[in-house]
Amino acid sequence: MIVKTEGVGLKRNGKWILEDINWQINKNEHWVLYGLNGAGKTALLNMLCAYYHPTVGSVEVLGKVFGKAELGGSLRKKIGLVSNRLQQNLYMTDSAYEIILSGAFASIGLYETPTDEIRQKAIDLLKMLGCFDYADREYSSLSQGEKQRVLIARALMLDPELIILDEPATGLDFLAREQLLETINVLAKQKNGPAIIYVTHHLEEILPVFSHSILLKKGKVFAKGQTEEMMTSKNLSEFFELPVEVIWNNQRPLLAKSLK
Ligand SMILES: Nc1ncnc2c1ncn2[C@@H]1O[C@H](COP(=O)(O)OP(=O)(O)OP(=O)(O)O)[C@@H](O)[C@H]1O
């Protein structure tokens, strides 16, 4: 099992920001975490990465139960977190290659000498994620889409069992978004690859490979299950409290305001 939360609640400054979260992610499942601004997605991710501890309930990630095992550092090395917040911490003058290499040490910047094996792995990932052509460029000079690929490659250096992509398509134009999604598709279809949690508030980013979805609303699980059963006009109209229509095209959902 990759993730199991039972009756999880999180209280911050006297306010419950997560309540009664029951969620299980099994091996070989890829999930979408869908919710509007302020739904509690970031709080939940922070909990899965052991940055927050639940106020009530139990959290188990990659076989480690919070509170019973030493968490934090050792667990985080098995989770690849790709988040725009992380970008602010990177050394912008490092090259794309150096940023990817630093993932092997879970460090910001390169302080250790990478072995030949680590270098080869970084090169393989540069190729797999289509970053090879700009490997030597300064990170700060890369486009948003190129940066995201580099961050995903970096997160893969330690062979994580779980990778969390936190709104990776934010700020990308249509073409860059589709190119990134194609790369994510390849990653998701990899044999023995990591489980993926794809966090978004855009329905049109949901690829067929994301078999399961969890809808978070105001800190609670609104619904969870098979993606095609979650992303229906009826379900999402209730979710938004507004009549909407879900249109499926090439096994991808699109959201529109209902005219009925
Ligand atoms: N430390 C805190 N103290 C009080 N309230 C908090 C704290 N951290 C988060 N919140 C509140 O909890 C709610 C959930 O926040 P969270 O950042 O998890 O939402 P989100 O789904 O990630 O939103 P977005 O899509 O905008 O990033 C918000 O209303 C936020 O203001």
Image (cartoon, rainbow, N blue to C red):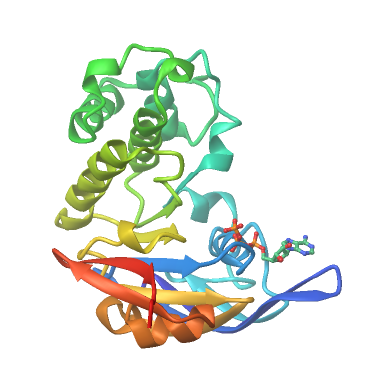
Rendered position, 140 above or below 39: above
Observer able to see residue 25:
no
How far across and how far down the image is residue 133, in percent? 22, 17
Q: Quadrant of residue 224?
A: bottom left
> Can you give x and y, in whole percent of width and height, for residue 109 in the image?
53, 22
Image quarter where the C terminus lies is bottom left
Q: In this view, does 59 lie above or below 136?
A: below
Location of residue 242 with respect to 88 vertically, above or below: below
Up the image or down, 131 lies above or below 159; here it is above
Q: Image check: 257 left or right of 126? A: right
Q: Which residue is drawn at 33% across and 42% down?
A: 156
**Closer to us: 205 or 163:** 205
- Looking at the image, which residue is at 43% across and 24% down? 99
Residue sitting farthest toward the front: 260
What residue is at 54 percent from the left and 83 percent from the top? 241
User: Is 233 left, or right, of 44 in this rendering?
Assistant: left
Residue at (38% x, 21% y) in the render: 96
Is 181 or 254 nearer to us in this picture? 254
- The answer to whether residue 136 shows anywhere in this view is yes
What x and y, as percent, mark residue 215? 46, 76
**Tag count:** 0
Q: Image quadrant of ligand 1?
A: bottom right
Of the 4 image quadrants, the one containing the N terminus is bottom left
Quadrant for residue 95, please give it.
Answer: top left
- Residue 73 location, x and y as percent? 57, 49
- Classify residue 105 as left or right of residue 185: right
